[in-house]
């Protein structure tokens, strides 16, 4: 039998070169990553083996982690356990092992010792609880510890980290992978992630992660295509030089470029068998060549998983030691099983395992699952609760599966894996009705388990799933259930509904909670129902109802000593009633912060911190807002709650505030810093789109399309809608697509009006942004003499301005005044309206420049650009040059390429010597056109025909036509309109900046 594992690699020179280039970048001190995609069996593993060998030869250390198909078990961080095992005893890992969670990974086990989660969502009802970080158990700290450990290892020797079979990765491993790709950009680590592209169905959880990762700096995607026929033939002949040509041709035809298929087809043919038509038959034919004992070992391994311990095979296989060793040796020598570095056995390819599993009879599969489950139960440390749950379910031991699923959920919670915790809790819920003593085994009733599962969903950012679970709890309680329990669920459900922007449903739920529990005597459940009802009433514009609930909640909270409920209600009141004195508002919020911290309710504490940042942000004091934002985010890191609702909102606010102040790099970094952003917090990343659009990033269009897809799915997520629409409008504006910009602004304004009613000042910003390209279109139409087009664009612009003014009027009538940002955008609208109408109003644009002086660096620069245009039109060339220089300085600092290009174009049109790099030499029109041609060009710009030009200049129509032809030839234009546009862009039009008549 040939040594196939030592075969030379064929047909992959180009792919190997790209991977080695990534390794070279790591050697040079730069982090990078390659996403290696390919169908099952196409040769990813062989390519990675070659890469590992070549990298080691270059002095690079190689660490490899394998993902394993455990069905829906969800074993957290398994590939990282595999990857870090070789470094566990090294000095670099010694200090890292002080982190309990990382110590668990280094030891290949979950971390124990963290307390269990509280039953239900008790924190939302104001009960004193253990601080929230114990619930998440330092998940961010674990991620940072892994990154730090890899960084320390890479500081000694550059690393190649191979992450194999990512299509099987559990969610926590995917999150950690995302974090590392963002975190290790400047560390000498080359990370290669392989996955099966043919496994990625439309809803596969890896798909959205790949879409994000490929847009990160230093990350590239490498598609491993099927091998060419010639390479497959070379492979076959390299494996068995004496193989007949007819066999080679048959293998090449049937393998269709898949290296593994080719090898298996060849192996079956060498055994004297007719080549099967289906690969499954080929794979099983290989298995059937084994002796009975070896076949039994392979079947045990297939049920156990792709990687299996020797002890488990020995315990379950039913063979004596001598038979077992011989059977394992046969399976290994026949290339069905491979011995891993850690001594465990794995299938040479996952397709082998799948074929064996598919061939098992149901009864045999159940018996093997039962035997494995019994071994795991009898062997401490023999496996995880998640593995036990899988095998208990497979053996129809539903009671055992329930207990194991609950224990697996607890283990997932202890290692900070909320997604896997939710998965296991939902598995327990699915088994509940089939287990007679489920409540006894679970130590809680089904309603409590539903509340626990909903709490895990909320911690993991799965708010819609939490809503569904809480509604199931209400259905289970029924109309005749305990009113206290029902009220508690109604209040908790209202909080979740409010966070997915379903304010009407949230108000209905708090109304029901209020109806179930009397106000007297005061109780915890009633107090929280009133506090939550105040918030939902205010959100619905029911101020009197909200005030009554808030007053009741404050009084009851004082009576019961519920600091968290008091603080939560105080925030609601401050946001609704407000005060003209920011110092008074701050003092009230700071008192709420003290009470929230005293109650140890992290959710309320983060809400208070968020509002402490919002108040100065609304007032235009971005510096103070950033102080509170950064303090809040730091506190969230300390508490381990960075994925909770209000920390995500703080992060979004931080992304926006940094964009406003001109810290664009910081804005992008904050947007992409979290390892995983829950779907309902997608607006955090979407907020960074404005930076990409503002810089003219080529990837901006793809990112905007990604955000637009989320908007369609989450149609009630207003902040996501606003972030996406703003980026879409700006992208269309810089592309000169006024129609798209106007359409996006109108659609977003209508949706915001539907969802937020009178509180929609954001519409002013959308309208102002869309008015800019619409005004440009109107100016161009006038320049070309297109009166009908100009009227059309003016109507469109006036409609947009009307949306802005209506939003302001509704806000003043129903909500009250507005801050510096609202003033600035409204001033911009008024300036754009004047430009739209063809009026030159430098004072309006100067007012816009001053209004954005509250701290919005970029928009102030854009206003200076338009002010310079207006000044040029009034022949204030010195003033225009000064504004252009100021705007260009900002554009250069921000890397705002589109704005920079617009400033340079204006400088050229105005023939202003700005000394701007790229502005070029100022060209005198007299050096290009004769005096008569300049006169003709000016009339062309006013839309005159040849006959009209001749009449006005007292020349014949034929002579006018000759001049027009000369102008088109000098400009390289194909028509009159193009000639005018080119002349305007190059600053060659007479009377530059004057409004067209």
Image (tube, grey):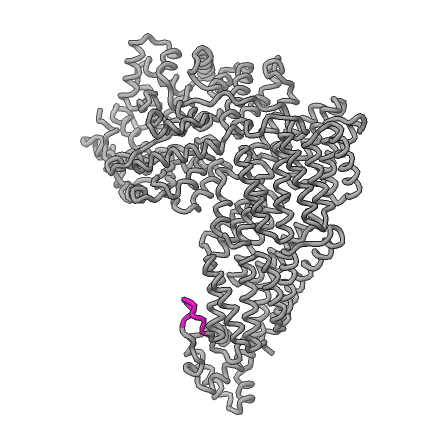
- Across and down, in percent, residue 923 comes to 42, 77
Position of 446 compared to 940: left or right? right
For residue 19, what is the image quadrant? top left
Instruction: From the viewer's side, name the closer residue of 789 and 471.
Output: 471
Q: Which of 948 and 544 is in front in this view?
A: 544
- Depth check: give the residue in front, 290 or 845: 845
Q: Position of residue 275 (x, y in %)?
A: 30, 28
Q: In this view, does 980 lie above or below 464?
A: below
Relative side of 339 to 610, left or right: left
Q: Quadrant of residue 715?
A: top right
Q: Give the range drawn in magenta.
A: 913-920
Is 917 inside the magenta-drawn segment? Answer: yes
Q: Which residue is drawn at 68% across and 58% down?
A: 803
Residue 926 vertical position relative to residue 531 in the rendered view, above or below: below
Given residues 238 and 695, the one toward you in this image is 695
Q: Quadrant of the N terminus?
A: top left
Q: In this view, which residue lies farthest toward the top?
A: 320
Q: Which residue lies furthest to the left in this view?
A: 242
Quarter of the picture containing the C terminus is bottom right
Residue 558, how many percent across, how many down? 74, 31
The mark tally for this picture is: 0
């Amino acid at each position: 039998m040939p040594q196939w594992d030592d075969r030379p690699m064929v047909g992959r020179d180009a792919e190997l070169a790209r991977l080695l280039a990534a390794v070279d970048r790591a050697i040079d001190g730069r982090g990078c990553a390659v996403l290696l995609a390919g169908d099952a069996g196409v040769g990813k593993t062989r390519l990675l083996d070659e890469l590992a060998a070549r990298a080691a030869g270059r002095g690079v250390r190689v660490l490899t982690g394998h993902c394993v198909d455990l069905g829906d078990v969800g074993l957290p961080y398994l590939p990282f356990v595999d990857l870090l095992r070789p470094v566990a005893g090294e000095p670099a890992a010694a200090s890292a092992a002080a982190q309990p969670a990382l110590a668990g990974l280094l030891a290949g086990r979950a971390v124990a010792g963290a307390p269990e989660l509280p039953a239900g969502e008790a924190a939302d009802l104001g009960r004193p609880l253990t601080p929230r970080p114990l619930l998440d158990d330092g998940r961010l700290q674990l991620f940072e510890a892994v990154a730090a450990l890899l960084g320390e290892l890479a500081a000694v020797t550059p690393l190649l980290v191979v992450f194999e079979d990512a299509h099987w990765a559990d969610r926590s491993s995917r999150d950690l992978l995302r974090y590392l790709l963002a975190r290790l950009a400047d560390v000498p680590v080359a990370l290669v992630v392989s996955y099966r592209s043919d496994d990625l169905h439309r809803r596969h959880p890896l798909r959205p992660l790949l879409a994000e990762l490929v847009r990160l700096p230093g990350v590239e995607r490498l598609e491993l295509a099927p091998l060419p026929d010639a390479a497959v033939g070379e492979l076959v002949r390299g494996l068995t030089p004496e193989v007949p040509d007819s066999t080679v041709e048959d293998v090449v035809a049937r393998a269709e470029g898949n290296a593994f298929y080719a090898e298996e087809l060849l192996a079956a043919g060498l055994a004297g068998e007719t080549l099967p038509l289906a690969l499954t038959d080929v794979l099983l034919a290989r298995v059937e060549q084994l002796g009975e004992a070896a076949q039994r070992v392979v079947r045990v391994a297939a049920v156990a998983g792709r990687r299996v311990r020797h002890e488990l095979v020995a315990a379950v296989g039913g063979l004596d030691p001598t038979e077992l060793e011989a059977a394992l040796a046969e399976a290994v020598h026949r290339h069905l099983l491979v011995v891993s570095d850690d001594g465990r056995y794995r299938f040479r390819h996952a397709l082998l395992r799948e074929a064996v599993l598919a061939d098992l009879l149901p009864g045999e599969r159940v018996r093997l699952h039962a035997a494995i489950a019994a071994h795991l139960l009898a062997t401490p440390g023999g496996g995880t609760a998640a593995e036990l749950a899988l095998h208990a379910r497979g053996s129809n031991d539903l009671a055992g599966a329930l207990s194991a699923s609950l224990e697996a959920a607890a283990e997932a919670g202890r290692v900070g894996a909320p997604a896997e915790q939710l998965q296991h809790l939902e598995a327990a819920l699915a088994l509940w009705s089939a287990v007679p003593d489920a409540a006894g085994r679970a130590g809680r009733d089904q309603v409590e388990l539903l509340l626990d599962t909903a709490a895990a969903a909320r911690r993991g950012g799965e708010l819609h799933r939490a809503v569904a679970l809480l509604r199931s709890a209400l259905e289970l309680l029924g109309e005749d259930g305990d009113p206290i329990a029902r009220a508690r669920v109604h209040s908790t459900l209202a909080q979740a509904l409010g966070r997915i922007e379903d304010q009407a449903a949230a108000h209905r739920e708090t109304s029901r909670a209020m109806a179930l529990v009397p106000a007297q005597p005061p109780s915890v459940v009633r107090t929280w129902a009133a506090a939550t009802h105040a918030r939902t009433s205010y959100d619905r514009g029911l101020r009197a109802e909200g005030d009554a609930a808030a007053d009741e909640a404050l009084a009851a909270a004082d009576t019961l000593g519920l600091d968290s409920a008091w603080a939560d209600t105080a925030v609601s009141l401050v946001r609704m009633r407000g005060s003209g004195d920011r110092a008074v508002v701050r003092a009230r919020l700071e008192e709420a912060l003290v009470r929230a911290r005293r109650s140890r309710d992290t959710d309320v504490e983060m809400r208070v911190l968020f509002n402490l940042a919002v108040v100065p942000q609304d007032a235009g004091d971005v510096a103070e807002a950033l102080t509170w934002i950064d303090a809040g985010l730091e506190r969230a890191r300390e508490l381990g709650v960075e994925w909770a609702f209000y920390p995500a909102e703080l992060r979004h606010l931080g992304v926006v505030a940094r964009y406003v102040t001109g810290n664009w790099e910081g804005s992008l970094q904050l947007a992409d810093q979290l390892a995983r952003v829950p779907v309902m917090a997608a607006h955090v990343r979407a907020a960074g789109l404005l930076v990409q659009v503002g810089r003219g990033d080529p990837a901006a269009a793809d990112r905007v399309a990604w955000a637009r897809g989320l908007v369609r799915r989450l149609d009630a997520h207003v902040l996501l809608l606003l972030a996406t629409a703003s980026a879409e409008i700006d992208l269309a504006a810089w592309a000169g697509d006024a129609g798209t910009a106007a359409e996006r602004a109108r659609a977003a304004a209508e949706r915001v009006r539907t969802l937020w009613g009178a509180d929609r000042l954001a519409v002013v910003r959308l309208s102002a942004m869309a008015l800019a390209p619409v005004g440009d279109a109107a100016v161009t139409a006038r320049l070309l003499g297109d009166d009908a087009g100009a009227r059309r664009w003016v109507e469109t612009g006036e409609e947009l301005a009307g949306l802005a003014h209506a939003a302001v009027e509704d806000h003043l009538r129903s909500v009250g005044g507005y801050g510096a940002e609202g003033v600035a955008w409204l001033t911009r609208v008024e300036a754009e309206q004047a430009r739209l109408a063809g009026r030159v109003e430098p004072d309006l644009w100067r007012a816009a420049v001053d209004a954005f002086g509250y701290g919005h660096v970029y928009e102030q620069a854009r206003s200076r650009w338009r002010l310079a245009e207006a000044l040029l039109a009034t022949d204030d060339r010195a003033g225009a040059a000064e504004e252009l220089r100021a705007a260009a300085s900002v554009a250069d600092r921000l890397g705002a390429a589109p704005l920079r290009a617009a400033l340079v174009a204006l400088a050229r049109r105005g023939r202003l010597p700005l000394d701007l790099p790229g502005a070029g030499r100022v060209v005198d029109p007299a050096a290009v056109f004769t005096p008569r041609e300049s006169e003709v060009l000016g009339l062309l710009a006013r839309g005159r025909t040849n006959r009209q030009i001749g009449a006005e200049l007292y020349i014949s129509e034929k002579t006018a036509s000759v001049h027009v032809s000369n102008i088109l030839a000098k400009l390289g234009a194909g028509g009159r309109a193009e000639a005018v546009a080119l002349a305007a862009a190059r600053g060659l039009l007479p009377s530059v900046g004057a409004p067209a008549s």
